[in-house]
Image (cartoon, helix red, strand yellow):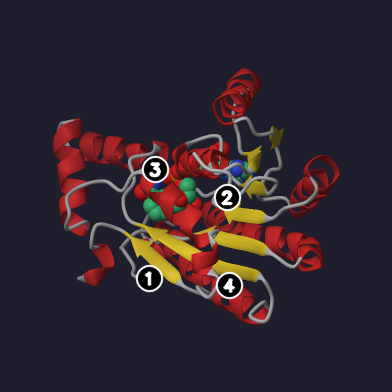
Amino acid sequence: MSNALKGKTALVTGSTSGIGLGIAHSLAAEGANILLNGFGDTATIDAVKQEITAKFGVRAEYHGADMTKPADIADMIQFAEDKLGGVDILVNNAGIQYVANVEDFPIEKWDAVIAINLSSSFHTIRCALPGMKKKGWARIINIASAHGLVASAQKSAYVAAKHGLVGLTKVVALETAKTGITCNAICPGWVLTPLVQKQIDARAANEGKSLEQAKIELLSEKQPSLEFVTVEQLGGLAVFLCSDAANQVRGAAWNMDGGWVAQ
Ligand code: NAD
C-alpha cells in the first residue's frame, strides 16, 4: 500500500465484479477514493464499499448508472463532481459478451454489446474531460481486450466494440497529447471472471466435457502461457499507467495476455 494516488478519485465502471473490482482494489491500495459502478444487490455493494474503506482507509461511493444510458452516465459524472471532487482516474471497464455466428446474432444483443463495451466509454470520456482539463492531470484507462487487437469467430459485436475502443483510445490520446491527461487501453487475455466462467460453462455443456477440461481447452486455443491473467496483475498495470513514469505512455493498447497476440 502507498499514498501515490492519495486525494485522487477513481471511477471504475463495472466494478461490482471481476476485473473492475480488482482494479478498484489496486487503485484504493494506492490511496485513491473509489466510485464504484455496476449491477448487483444493495447488500453486496454496501459490503464492497465498506471493505474498501476499512482495508485502504479511502472513501468509497457507488453510482448505479446503467452504461447503456447516456443520461445515467452524465448523472454519474456529476455525482463524482458533487461527492468526490470530480474524476481524476477514469477506468472504462464495464462490458458484456455474447457469442453467436454473425447471421444469427440477435440485433438487440449487438446493440447492447456496442452500447456497453464501446459507446459508454465515449459518454464517460465526453462528460469527464472538461473537469479533467480544469485539473490539468488525469488518467483514462480503457479496458479493451486481446479482442481489441485480433479477432475470434462468433464474437462479432465484442470484437467490433473492442477494436473501436482501441481506436477511441488513440483519438482521445491525440486530443489530450499536450495536457497532463493520458488515455491508454489495456488488452487482457483470458481472466477467470464471471464473464469467462459463463463461456467455460457453455463449452462444457455443449461439448459434454468437464469444467476442468473446458477450462484447459479454452486456454490452449489462445493463451500460450496456459495460465489466466489475474485481476491483481491488471490492477498493477493500471497503477503503473497512473504513475509519473507513464506520463508519456499515450494512446497505447497494452496487451497483458499470456502471449495471445504475439502469435
Ligand atoms: P464481469 O462480468 O465479471 O464484470 C462486468 C461488470 O460490468 C460487472 O460489474 C457488471 O455489473 C458490469 N456491467 C455489465 N453491464 C452493465 C451495464 N449495462 N451498466 C453498468 N455496469 C454493467 O466481467 P469481467 O470479465 O470482469 O470484464 C470486465 C471488462 O474486461 C469487460 O469490458 C470485458 O470485456 C473485459 N475483458 C475481460 C476479459 C476476461 O477474460 N474476463 C478479457 C479481456 C477483456
Disc 2 and disc 1 in contact, CB within 8 angstroms: no
Work out whether mark 1 precedes mark 3 in sequence or the reverse, and give the earlier one: 1
Q: Which residue is mark 1?
A: 149
Identity, as a three-letter code, of the amino acid under mark 4: Leu
Residue 180 location, x and y as percent?
67, 71
Q: Position of residue 48 (x, y in %)?
A: 57, 26
Residue beneath label 2, please?
A: 4
Ligand 1 near label 4 (Cβ, under 8 Å)? no
Q: Which residue is mark 3?
A: 232
Please report the residue visible at 44 percent of the width from the left and 70 percent of the height from the top: 253
Q: Amino acid at mark 1?
A: Leu
Where in the figure is residue 36, as x and y percent of width and height? Answer: 64, 38
- Position of 50 relative to 117 (above/below): above
Between marks 1 and 4, how big is the CA–CA gap? 13 Å
Could you tell me which secondary element the residue under label 2 belongs to?
loop
Check whether the beta carbons of the residues at disc 4 and disc 2 lie within 8 A of each other: no
Looking at numbered disc 3 in the image, what kind of residue is underneath it?
A: Glu
Q: Quadrant of the C terminus?
A: bottom left
Vertical placement of residue 27 versus 254, above or below:
above
Q: Which residue is mark 4?
A: 168
